[in-house]
């Protein structure tokens, strides 16, 4: 059963921008802190941004000032606006609750930043 669906990834040059979206069921978004995670080849999956139901946000140091997480609870959607992208941002990006719930992991969306 699909719970969360990520979209919006692609290939972009360094310095460019992308906006990721994650749509899911109301039952997931209604009471949960949501997060965006990423996994680069050969590396562990890491949390890059999180947002509470009330809109409070936290970011990994590596993306602070460049990425912005937001959510639309009415649409059961969480977004990740990524600006000033760097080659080291290349990864598969996933959304999930924070802490993550294994059954919610989706296919993710690939982000590739060329130098």
Image (tube, helix red, strand yellow):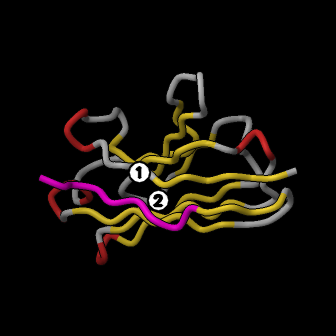
Q: Give the range drawn in magenta.
A: 1-9
Q: What element carries label 1?
A: loop
Residue 23 lies, in percent from the top left, at 32, 66
Please tell me whether residue 3 belongs to the stretch shown in magenta: yes
Is residue 64 left or right of 20 when viewed as pictured?
Answer: right
Please say if 94 is above or below 99.
below
Please say if 88 is above or below 111.
above
Is residue 82 left or right of 114 when viewed as pictured?
Answer: left
According to the picture, the residue beneath numbered tag 1 turns out to be 52
Is residue 96 left or right of 16 when viewed as pictured?
Answer: left
State the residue in front, 30 or 14.
14
According to the picture, the residue beneath numbered tag 2 turns out to be 55
Q: Is mark 2 on a helix, strand or loop?
A: loop
Kindly report the distance in space between the C-alpha atoms of the residues bearing marks 1 and 2.
5 Å
Is residue 20 left or right of 81 when viewed as pictured?
Answer: left
Residue 14 lies, in percent from the top left, at 85, 56
Q: Which residue is drawn at the image coordinates 52% and 67% (left, top)?
A: 8
State the residue in front, 25 or 103.
103
Mark 2 neighbour density, 10 Å: few (under 14) some (14–19) many (20 or more): few
**Proximity of marks 1 and 2: CB atoms separated by less than 8 Å:** yes
């Amino acid at each position: 059963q699909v719970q969360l669906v990520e979209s919006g990834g692609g290939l972009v040059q360094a310095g460019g921008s992308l906006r990721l979206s994650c749509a899911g069921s109301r039952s997931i978004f209604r009471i949960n802190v949501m997060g965006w995670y990423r996994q680069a080849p050969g590396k562990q999956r890491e949390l890059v941004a999180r947002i509470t139901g009330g809109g409070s946000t936290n970011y990994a140091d590596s993306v602070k000032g460049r990425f912005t997480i937001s959510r639309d609870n009415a649409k059961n959607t969480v977004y990740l606006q990524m600006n000033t992208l760097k080659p080291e941002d290349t990864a598969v990006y996933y959304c999930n609750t924070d802490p993550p719930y294994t059954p919610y992991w989706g296919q993710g969306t690939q982000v590739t930043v060329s130098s």
